Amino acid sequence: MLMFNMELLNDIDSFKKYLVDCFQQPSMQQQHLSGAGATHYLEAKLKDYYNKKYALTFCNATTALHALCIAMDLNNTEILTSPINWGGSVAPFIFNKNRLRFTSFDPISLNLSLRDLPSAITKKTKAVLSVDFNGTPVDSKAIKDFCSQNNLIYISDCAQSMGSFLNDKPAGYYSDAIVLSFSPGKSFFAGEGGAIITDDVTIYEKLLWYSQHPSRQKTAFGLSNFNDYAPINGRMNPFSVFFLNEIFQLSLINLKSHQFKCFELLSQLQKENLIESTPHINAPSSSSFFNFSLQLRPLVKIEQLNEFLQNHNQSFIAVPVLPKIIPFDIIFRKQFRSKYSCSESLLKQYGNFRLNDRVKLIFVK
């Protein structure tokens, strides 16, 4: 998605200068430990983008989720989440001795179903984890309202959806904590990295206490109040921070171009009656199009879709895709036999739902 141009070349020159400065001025190295320099500027950009009070960068999104489990005291409890998920999203919760309860999913977006959340909750439920599958945001306001009514924590995994909006708000906006990823293929690429965005000062301070270097803790809590025994070294690599800070605006421009092209193609395919309508995507910004996953119309073959793409000089090819439903995956079931349960609504849906008409568009040039 990120195209090489002269503007990026200038950013690379800045990166070279940063490396030289780190060797010549040891104080430059210490900025990273205290959250100063590029870390400070990148987190400021993230706060401004989401219109939130706090942003904290991490080495990756999975580690960020581990830190949230500790900061939010999510241990030996139950987490409601979607069965169409990513292993790195659910693993931190299992590692922290939580039990996952999978509930039903929306048949169009494949995100967590809002309708069945009330029936999925149990006495042990403490939090809800939503995942914006393929970059399309779930209705975070509706989920937050549900969580507020039931005294639950709400975490939104927006690793695939940064740059997408729902009702003029960034993906995950209403959650207690937004989790981002900057790894390969994501909207904003830093080589590796992640972040947590929140308005909750308690969550932010606990994350600092359990995952950041004492040098940074001292800037927030005072010189005599720091934690030498933080269980997670969560900070983002300094080179990744510097790189992403330098190309943040360029990445945003390239993302918007990608969204527009994908949305334009989506509209064409729907007009040609090749794919099912996707009412959850109503504007270019309503998805990051992390994975361009579509549902074929009845009787339409994948060969017809590829013929259309080729005849219209599109830079995509369609391939079959079968989204993994985690609780019914053999490897997951063997490894985590007693670590999860499924709601009745999911069991019923799984028995009737067919995914073999799904395709994924892959960018080829």
Image (spheres, grey):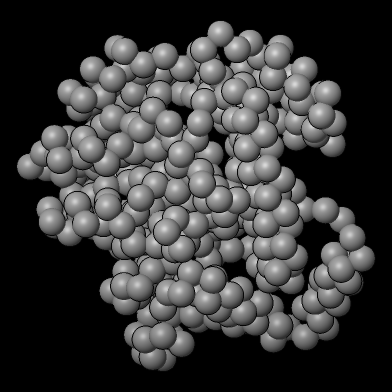
On the image, the x and y values in percent for residue 340 come to: 25, 29
Report the front residue among 305 and 333: 305
Above or below residue 214? Residue 229 is above
Report the front residue among 1 and 341: 1
Q: Is residue 174 visible?
A: yes
Residue sitting at x 34%, y 54%: 140
Residue sitting at x 67%, y 34%: 268
On the image, the x and y values in percent for residue 18 come to: 80, 76
Asked whether, in this view, residue 262 is left or right of residue 49, the answer is right
Counting labels gives 0
Residue sitting at x 61%, y 17%: 320
If the image is split into quadrants, where does the C terminus sit?
top right
Residue found farthest to the front: 271
Above or below residue 71? Residue 1 is above
On the image, the x and y values in percent for residue 301 come to: 63, 10
Asked whether, in this view, residue 52 is left or right of residue 35, the answer is left
Above or below residue 232? Residue 11 is below
Residue sitting at x 43%, y 74%: 52
On the image, the x and y values in percent for residue 299 come to: 56, 8
Q: Is residue 239 visible?
A: no
Report the front residue among 227 and 288: 288
Above or below residue 187? Residue 313 is above
Residue found farthest to the left: 123
Residue found farthest to the bottom: 223
Asked whether, in this view, residue 121 is left or right of residue 64, the answer is left
